Image: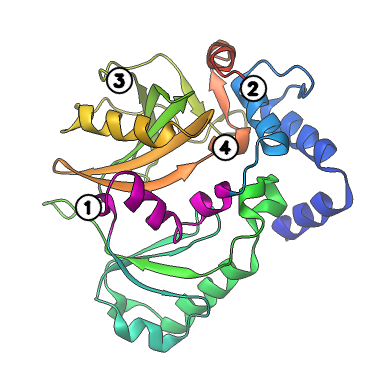
Amino acid sequence: MKYKLWVFFSKIIPTRLYLKTLFLIRQKSFLHLRRPKTLNEKIQYLKIWGYKDFHTTIADKYLVRDYIKNKIGEKFLIPCIHETPAPVEKDFEKLPHSFVMKANHGSSQVKIIHDVGKENLSDLVSLCNKWLKENHYDITKEPQYKNIKRRIIFEELLLDVNGNLPLDYKFHCISGKLEFIQVDIDRFTNHVRNFYNEKWEKLPFNWAPWKNGKEVYPLGRDIPKPQSLEEMNKIAETLAKDFGYVRIDLYNLNGAIYFGEITLHHGSGWERFNPQKFDDVYGSKLKLNS
């Protein structure tokens, strides 16, 4: 019901007013679009004035695969097992016992399947159909999501030698230069995150959503420098060259690097820096209309 109310609200008021309202609710501050200074403000600016046609392709989790293949090579792609615009129970008969099920057109529409034999296939189909009815643009006003042709994709499930999911590394780049690395830990259990520089020195801030006066994803335990970090840094900057601000997500499985996704507006620009001054620091690095 809450989702439907926000969709209704987003469709009856002008986009700028909608973004200013959400920014005030999430950031607890006013949004300045004429002279944006912080990184979060500039992300809102880019939603309105920064769209380019190819952004829809790179936001599509299926079509982006060809983009990545041409930019850095097919070896960095997680194998895609199956895809369909209209999933039915028979689709699951083609799949291995474990896989990742996701929608190609939104955010956080992901389900990890460790053993499909223990799943209710009707429930999985219903979940897919629920995803397919949603348009991420309606909530965030991120234009790259608006016209994606929706489908469900099934990817190979990556697990380390201990049967754990690999860590999720997010490389935040401005003007093609890596500024900091976000690593999300225990994403599907006790989700926490940390931030590091390119040398893997821990940085003194968080950038996360807030709820009930506290960070939803607080800072976590320190983790060791990943294998092949220098190569990951290089891949991120290679993919970032076509963007002002962008987040490049990569996985590292025992030194083997896999592409996750390209995100143009981290957290839709509604997550808060803590301390807040870092919102200004990184905002000053992003030059608009340059």
Dot 2 amino acid type: Leu
Quarter of the image for residue 204 reads: top left
Q: In this view, does 268 lie above or below 279?
A: below
Give the residue displayed 81% in from the left and 42% down from the top: 15
- Closest to the observer, 77 or 128: 77
Query: Circle 4 is placed at which residue position?
Result: 265
Farthest left residue?
161
Q: Mark 2 against mark 4, which lies toward the viewer?
A: 2
- Which structural element holds mark 3? loop
Dot 1 amino acid type: Lys
Magenta segment includes 75: yes
Q: In this view, does 229 lie to the left or right of 100?
A: left
Kindly identify which numbered label has been placed on residue 75.
1
Give the residue displayed 61% in from the left and 38% down from the top: 268
Cα separation, mark 1 vs mark 3, equals 23 Å
Q: Is residue 34 left or right of residue 13?
A: left
Magenta segment includes 229: no
Query: Circle 2 is placed at which residue position?
Result: 288
Query: Circle 3 is placed at which residue position?
Result: 198
Q: Where residue 149 sits in the image (x, y, percent)? A: 58, 66
Give the residue displayed 28% in from the left and 44% down from the top: 251
Query: Which class describes the residues within 10 Å of circle 4: few (<14), some (14-19), or many (20+)?
Result: some
Q: Quadrant of the N terminus?
A: bottom right
Query: Which class describes the residues within 10 Å of circle 3: few (<14), some (14-19), or many (20+)?
Result: some
Q: Are marks 1 and 4 in contact (CB under 8 Å)?
A: no
